[in-house]
Image (spheres, rainbow, N blue to C red):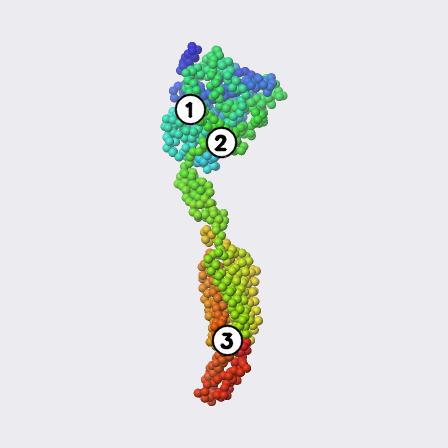
Amino acid sequence: MVLSALWMLCLLVSRDRVHACKGPREFVGARAPGDIIIGGLFAVHGRTFSVTSGYPKKPALQICGGFDLEGFLQTLAMIHTIESINNSTLLRGIKLGYEIYDTCADVSTAMVAAMRFMAKVNTSGDTLESRCNYIDYTPRVKAVIGASNSEVSIAVSRMLTLQLIPQVSHSSSADILSDALRFPSFFRSIPSDVFQTKAMANLVQRSGWNWIGMIATDDEYGRLAVEGFGRQAMALNVCIAFRETLPADLSDITIDKRINEVMILISSAAKVNVIVVFLKPYLVIKLFQKALELGVNRTWLASDSWSASLQISSLPNIRSIGRVIGFMFKNGNVPRFSEFLKRLGQRDFESNKLLAQYAILLTGCSHVSGHNLHNCISNYSKGNWFYSAPTMEVPLSEDFLAASVLPGFIYSTHLAMTAVAHAIRNLCRLRNCKNPASFAPWQLLEALKSVSFIDGKSQIKFDSKGDMNIGYDVLFWKEDDNGDVSIDIVAEYNLEKDSFIFHERSKKLEFNELMNIESKCSDECIPGQMKKASTTRHTCCYGCVSCPENHYSDETDMGNCLKCGNKSHWAPVGSSRCFPKKIDFLDWTDGFSIVLLGLAAFGVLLTFVISIIFTRNLNTPVVKASGGVLCYIILLCLFFSFLSTGFFVGRPSTFQCRARQLFFGLSFTLCVACILLKSLKISLAFSFDPKLQGFLKRLYKPFTMVSICTGIQITICACWLIFDPPFVAENYSIPKTIILECNEGSTVAFGVMLGYIALLAFVCFMFAFNGRKLPENYNEAKFITFGLLIYFIAWITFIPVYVTTFGKYLPAVEMIVILISNYGILCSTFFPKCYIILCKQETNTKTAFLKILYKYSSKSASSLAVSRVSRQPRHFDMDAASKPSVIYTNNNCYFDHRMRASEQTPKINSKINQRKRLASI
């Protein structure tokens, strides 16, 4: 207790005194002699204070404060590694020494140490010579381990580059230091910040965050980190809501004001729930103290500089600030370091002033324990740290010190020193390295570039930029059973695979739970919506609109809706996927199809019935007058025409599309050709005009006429099928349905085919129309005229209806017209004959036929005679009261005895015989 009181009094007195730097023993933090001296730069203190109030007024060293256990342990790691190497066979006969300086996280303080490193070896006055080249110059040290901060390393490296003294940093991660042109002597045993910022950006993107804030120090490290992370975040569509910087030095009079402004900004940004922090530990402490005061709760993404800081994690009520997720350099095994820490109390405090100060501070804080001890040690070290060393062995609370170890920094310090030792071994194989002048630092630099060694299971070497890409551990601050905050490793970030690796399933579940928070400027657009850009400059702030018809989005926050890949799919408004369109066509089960097919079947049945009736009455005058065999050809044509309607129903195929038009076109053409032949025959039989009769006789060639008429249609159809035939087409005019239909191919050929039938029908109509006043009971001409009128009306109506109709019922339009045409021909041509055959059998005899025929012929002859008399007056001697009568004998017609002979009798008999012959009676 007495000893503790004396040390406490020494501490309190020294806090108010300023000591000059009188010599190397008072400036060097720790040292040990050796054949080859290695320099060390560590931030054992976190800040500096001016000797006078305000800014410095004299060129003197600043007072260091804020003892940092992490920096102190890194010096111990370097000392332990050097002693382990000296006790091993790695450097046989060569002993490494060291000179370690505390930079106090200050560039100016570090520059003083760098100048001592560059001073000429074995000079009592620490002489630093200025030369044009330093090829044969031997400085005090051969290599430097450190510094801790990137800003310090940048300044120190520029100085060491003058003599190309190798510098291997254990924690300076700024990307600019990878530039071998500007920093040719710089190496580091950790990855560049490029990888850390990339890992952070991937973590943010993996967690679904796109609206985050950034806070960094206003120095090289902070600015480069903000730039690097911003670039990585932008590539992953992550937006940064704000970028704020804090002064790098706590002595800056604006530091409290800036922290207040930053915390007010964070409090007002309600949607920014994730803050990326690139700050030095002492700045994070002040920031979190303000956050605790204002009750700010966020998720903090920590950089390697403070992610494992026990000083910060031990702040009172620190768990109230929210979650802390950080990145730390990959941990590895440092053999027997724990045992080294347990023997610290036995060491020479005179050669290690840093250890002496730790002993004093530990004693001064003996009244506290646990995590509060970190803060006590830091708060009690606000003065000059050049204290008198204790002269006896003291208890150093080894368990507390071992619990304060930051594995990543300890391991990276161990790797840095081990790499230098392997480079010295490679260089000293053929030279006596006990002599300080045996090699120059620039020669060690070349050996260091190619160094490679195995540490544990990993091969360690520097890449072309001088970095060791050992990867990162992902840390999470969580509350333990005692209510304190502990730092746990939940994942590993692999640089080569650019991915997070989980060695335990429970850790992965814990990690996913940690990421389950929202940090977005806008609510995410659900599938079926797309982002609509807002008026702000940030792409992460947007609205959501539904996808238009036939477009979809199947992920959240899609920038654009995707169009359905092909026409066979559709999507309603606001759809998250495309649906296959319904395939539709005029199906056999459709009610309309059933009706039309029923009518076609009934038409087929009628043709059979009529064929039977005509066959049973084949030798009757009515059947003979109707054309006999010609009737069967017409009925067969109508049969095929009715059958052709079946090709308009069902799922279309190429054969179906071609067959239906071919069947109808040829069958109906042959039908009309036969009707034309009948009309021509009737006109020829009942014509009294000699000139017309002569023309009709020359024209009336039954086989030739039918062959030519049908042959022309065959030619039209053949050309159609060869050059542009019908085919199956998909009609997408209905949004949700694909109509399978027959595309007629050449619409010209289709029109020519129908037009040719219409032309034949028109010619037939003209002949039939001229013969419409033939004998009443046997006059086919007027019925043919009526049937053809039905045909014309149906097809004239068909054209506009067909053109304006679309959908699956389009084939039904043509079916209806075909059925109307068929029924028109069938009913007008055959029904009257069947009526006579079945219902008026008394008129279906030769006698009745000739009687009616004679009356018509007599009337026609009389009319012709009157017409001639009117043109050439003649006188007949005939009893007006007497009426001629006809006697039928052996199929010949004569006047009875009451009729006086005249010149009309031979002509009438001649006409009757002619008509009998043409009528096949």
Residue that mark 2 sits on: 508
C-alpha distance separating marks 1 and 3: 121 Å
Amino acid marked by disc 1: Gly
Residue that mark 1 sits on: 483
* Mark sitting earlier along the chain (1/2): 1
Picture residue at 56% right of the left edge, 73% below the top:
701
The part of the image, by quadrant, that contains residue 287 is: top left
Residue that mark 3 sits on: 844
Residue furthest to the top in view is 2
Q: Quadrant of the N terminus?
A: top left
Picture residue at 56% right of the left edge, 28% below the top:
462
Q: Position of residue 147 (x, y in %)?
A: 49, 23
C-alpha distance separating marks 3 and 2: 103 Å
* Mark sitting earlier along the chain (3/2): 2
In the rendered image, the vertical position of residue 669 relative to residue 682, given as above or below = above
Q: Quadrant of the C terminus?
A: bottom right
- Of 597 and 680, which appears nearest the observer? 597
Q: Position of residue 679 (x, y in %)?
A: 51, 73
Secondary element at image label 3: loop
Picture residue at 44% right of the left edge, 28% below the top:
324
Q: Mark 1 or mark 3: which is in front?
A: 3
The part of the image, by quadrant, that contains residue 323 is: top left
The dot on residue 672 is none
Amino acid marked by disc 3: Asn
Secondary element at image label 1: loop
Q: Is residue 192 visible?
A: no
In the rendered image, the vertical position of residue 845 relative to residue 351, given as above or below = below
- Of 499 and 142, which appears nearest the observer? 499
